[in-house]
Image (tube, helix red, strand yellow):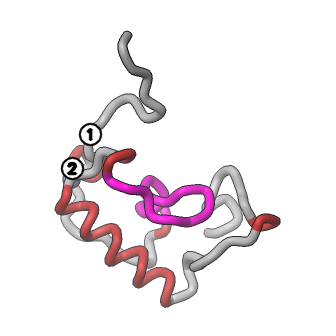
Amino acid sequence: MAEKRKYKKRYCKYCEAKVDFMDYKDAGALRFSLSERYKIMPRRLTGNCKRHQDMISIVIKRARAAALVPYTVTRKQVVVAPFENLK
Ligand SMILES: [Zn+2]
C-alpha cells in the first residue's frame, strides 16, 4: 500500500455505459463529472477517457448556458450532493 488515492478505481463510467451521445438536458448523466461546486471534474480524478471528457465539457458548458447548471456557487449554496434540488 504505497499510495492511497481518493478516487481509487479509474475507469471511464461513460465507456462502461456505452454512451455515444450526451444530452445537455439530461442532468443525471453530468452528475459523475461535476464537483459539489458544479465544477467540471478533471480527468485525472474521474478516470474518464479523452473522448468522453471532451463530450462532457461541451455538454456541461451548454447546460450552463441553458441555466441548468450554475456557473458559480457561493459558499451558502454548496451542496454535498448536487442535483438533489436540481431535477
Ligand atoms: Zn469513455
Residue type highlighted by circle 1:
Tyr
Q: Residue at x 31, y 46 (%)?
A: 13
The kind of secondary structure element at disc 1 is loop
Cα separation between marks 1 and 2: 8 Å
In percent of width and height, residue 39 lies at 51, 65
Start-end of magenta stretch: 28-43
In percent of width and height, residue 40 lies at 45, 64
Q: Is residue 52 left or right of residue 25?
A: left
Q: Is residue 54 left or right of residue 25?
A: left
The kind of secondary structure element at disc 2 is helix
State the quadrant of the C terminus: bottom right
Q: Where is residue 20, by image quadrant?
A: bottom left
State the quadrant of the N terminus: top left
Can you identify the residue that label 2 sits on? 15
Q: Is residue 18 visible?
A: no
Question: Which mark, residue 37?
Answer: none
Given residues 59 and 7, the one toward you in this image is: 7
Residue farthest toward the right in the current orientation of the protein: 76
Tell me if the residue at label 2 has its CB under 8 Å from ligand 1.
yes
Q: Residue at x 55, y 80 (%)?
A: 68
Nearer the observer, disc 1 or disc 2? 1
In percent of width and height, residue 38 lies at 56, 65
Q: Residue at x 61, y 62 (%)?
A: 37
Q: Is residue 79 visible?
A: yes
- Dots 1 and 2: beta carbons under 8 Å? yes
Up-down relation of residue 39 to residue 24 (above or below): above
Residue type highlighted by circle 2:
Cys
Given residues 78 and 19, the one toward you in this image is: 78
The answer to whether residue 6 is magenta is: no
Question: Which mark, residue 11?
Answer: 1
